[in-house]
Image: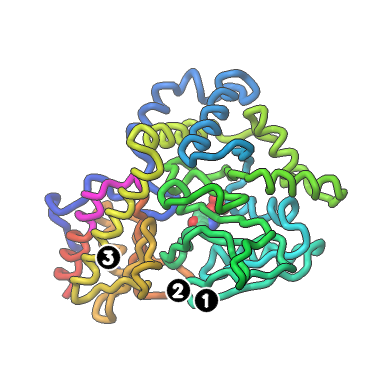
Amino acid sequence: MSTPEIVIPASLLPADGRFGCGPSKVRPEAVAALASVGQSWLGTSHRQRPVLDAVGRLRAGLRDLFGLPEGYEVILGNGGSTVFWDVATFGLIERRSQHCVFGEFSSKFAAAAKEAPHLEDPEIVRSEPGTRPDPVANDAVDLYALTHNETSTGVMMPVARPRHADGRVVSGLVAVDATSGGGALPVDPADFDAYYFAPQKVFASDGGLWIALLSPAAVERVGAIKASGRWQPASLDLSIALDNSRKDQTYNTPALATIFLMNEQIGWLLGNGGLAWAADRSAGSARIVYSWAKASDYATPFVTDPAHRSNVVATIDLDERVDAQVVSKVLRANGIVDTDAYRKLGRNQLRIGLFPAIEPSDVEAFTRSVDYVVAALS
Ligand SMILES: *Cc1c(COP(=O)(O)O)cnc(C)c1O
C-alpha cells in the first residue's frame, strides 16, 4: 500500500523529528563537538592518553551522575546490552537466576541464562505485556534480573531489593537492565549490584558498548566465579573487563565516536542538574503524551496502570479506525521517524522515546502532528 500524501504544516512539526527508542536522537551540539575534534580524536590510538582520559572521564561522569558510593565500580566493554546478558551468564550468575519477564528484552536475558549449560534453569516470574511482575524472594536464587524500563512495551519498574515475607532483604545480587531507563529514571545505588546499559538511548550516542555499575558484592562475585575456574570466553570475561576498566580502557578496540558522544551527553546531563533533572524532564514529556492520549478520542495509553507507564518510552494504542502503521509512514514522510510499535508486540500502536535529549516542546509538536495526520486520514 502506498503512503497517503499528507503534508504536515511546518508550524505543527517538531524541530527535531527523531523519536526512536534506540538508536535515539543524538544532540546536534554533540555531533558538532565531535566534528570539531575530527582530526585530533577520530583515528587515534585507544591505548594513548587522550582516549584513556576520555574513558576515565566517562567513568567519573557516571559515578557522579548516579552518586555511586565508595567501592562501586564503573566498567565497560564492547557489544552492547545484549552482550552483557552473555557476560552476566558467565560472570555474575553463580548457579540460578530469577528473571522478571514482561516483554522482549527481559525475556532475552532469561533465554540466555536458560541455555547456559553451566547454570541451573532460571526461575521465571512473568506478566502480560503492558504490565509488570514483582520479583519473588527465593533463597535458591543468587541473582535477580530486573528491567528498569521494558522498551518493547513501555512499562517501567522501580528498582528495589526483593524482600522475604518477614522483611529480610534477599541475599542474591540484583542485576538491572537499565538500557533505556538508566540516566532518566530515579535509582538509588544501594538498591542494585549491577546496573547496566548501552549508549544509544538516554546517553544519546551510538550503540556498541555495554556499561555496568557494579556494587562491591558484584565485584566480589566476579572474583569468586573467576577463582572457581569456570571457563569464560575472554571477550565475555567480567574479571578481564574489570581489570581493563580500572585502567580506563576496554579489552579490545572501542568505537571512539561512541565514547566521545556519550561523554558529551553525560556532561550535558550533569551541567543541567544531573539525574534528578533528567528524570524530571522525561517525566514532563511523559505527562504531555499520556494526557494527550487520554484526552484524544482515538488514542489510549497501552499501559493501563498509570504508575507502570514509562517516563522514557510511551506506547499509545490507536483505535481500529486508524491504522498506526499508516500514521507512522506518513509521519516518516514528514521527517518524524521511528514511531512504530515494537514489531513483535503486534499492536495497532505508536511508540516514542521520551529521553532527555528530546525536547518536551517537540513531544508536544509530535502530538499535534499525529492529530493532524489522523484528521487528514479520516
Ligand atoms: C535496547 C535495549 C536492549 C538492547 O541493547 P543493545 O545495545 O542493542 O544490545 C536491551 N535491553 C533493553 C531494556 C533495551 O531497551
Q: Depth check: 198 or 177 in front?
A: 177
Q: What residue sits right under mark 2 in the picture?
A: 131
Q: Is residue 255 above or below residue 336?
A: above
**Marks 2 and 3, how far apart at CA:** 16 Å
Q: Under tag 3, what secondary structure?
A: helix
- In the rendered image, the residue lying farthest to the right is 229
Q: In this orientation, does residue 107 appear?
A: no
Left or right for 188, reference 367: right
Label 2: few (<14), some or many (≥20) within 10 Å? Answer: many
Residue type (three-letter) at the residue carrying disc 2? Thr
Q: Which residue is mark 1?
A: 127
- Label 2 lies in ligand 1 vicinity (Cβ under 8 Å): no
Q: Residue 74 got which mark?
A: none
Tell me the residue that label 3 is attached to: 290
What residue do we see at 86% from left, 50% from top? 228
Q: Residues within 10 Å of mark 1 (few under 14, many from 20)?
A: some
The residue at the point 53 percent across, 31 percent down is: 60
Left or right for 262, reference 17: right
Q: CA distance from mark 1 to mark 3?
A: 22 Å
User: Which residue corresponds to the image point at 23% horizontal and 65% vertical from the top-left?
Assistant: 291
**Residue 67 is at least partly visible in this image:** yes
Quadrant assignment for the N terminus: bottom left
